[in-house]
Amino acid sequence: MQQESDVTRYLLAKPGAYADYPFGPDVRVFKVAGKVFALFDPSRQPVRINLKCEPMQALALRDMFCAIEPGYHMNKKHWNTITLDGTVPEGELLRLFDLSFELVVRGLPKAKRAGLLAP
């Protein structure tokens, strides 16, 4: 999953997810209930996407994959930037996309979480 169109399609398939452009037309921001769970510049190749991550897991992933770095212009404790250059296996990428979404949804008030996560 290296094409921005595939990434966009996958992220927008999440319940309640939508794309926004609060930083202008160059940065596609994916939100759920008004909270960011992913963002990238679709014109940049290879795509570099910022995803939320649990702090200890974020550090471990940075050690395991050269394509995963501290989040660019984000809180480096909670965000990673992943270069989609083919070195991170697709299954791991999908897991990280899902994790970012789930972390954001879990942080929402209970009323807003309804229907956004699998039971």
Image: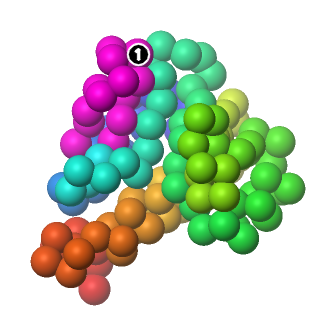
Q: Position of residue 2 (x, y in %)?
A: 56, 32
Q: Position of residue 109 (x, y in %)?
A: 23, 75
Circle 1: is it few (<14), some (14-19), or many (20+) Cα within 10 Å? few
Closest to the observer: 35 or 98?
35
* Position above or below: 113 against 24: below
Q: Residue at x 36, y 48 (%)?
A: 36
* Position above or below: 64 against 112: above
105 left or right of 33 in image? right
So how many labels did they put on this image?
A: 1
Residue 113 appears in which quarter of the rendering? bottom left
**Does residue 40 belong to the magenta stretch?**
no
Q: Which residues are magenta?
A: 18-30
Q: Residue at x 74, y 43 (%)?
A: 69
Q: Which residue is mark 1?
A: 26
36 left or right of 108 in image? right
Instruction: Say what secondary structure mark 1 lies in.
Output: loop
Q: Residue at x 33, y 17 (%)?
A: 24
Q: Position of residue 20 (x, y in %)?
A: 26, 33
Q: Residue at x 71, y 45 (%)?
A: 70
Q: Quadrant of the C terminus?
A: bottom left
Residue 114 visible = no
Q: Position of residue 104 (x, y in %)?
A: 38, 63
Q: Amino acid at mark 1?
A: Asp
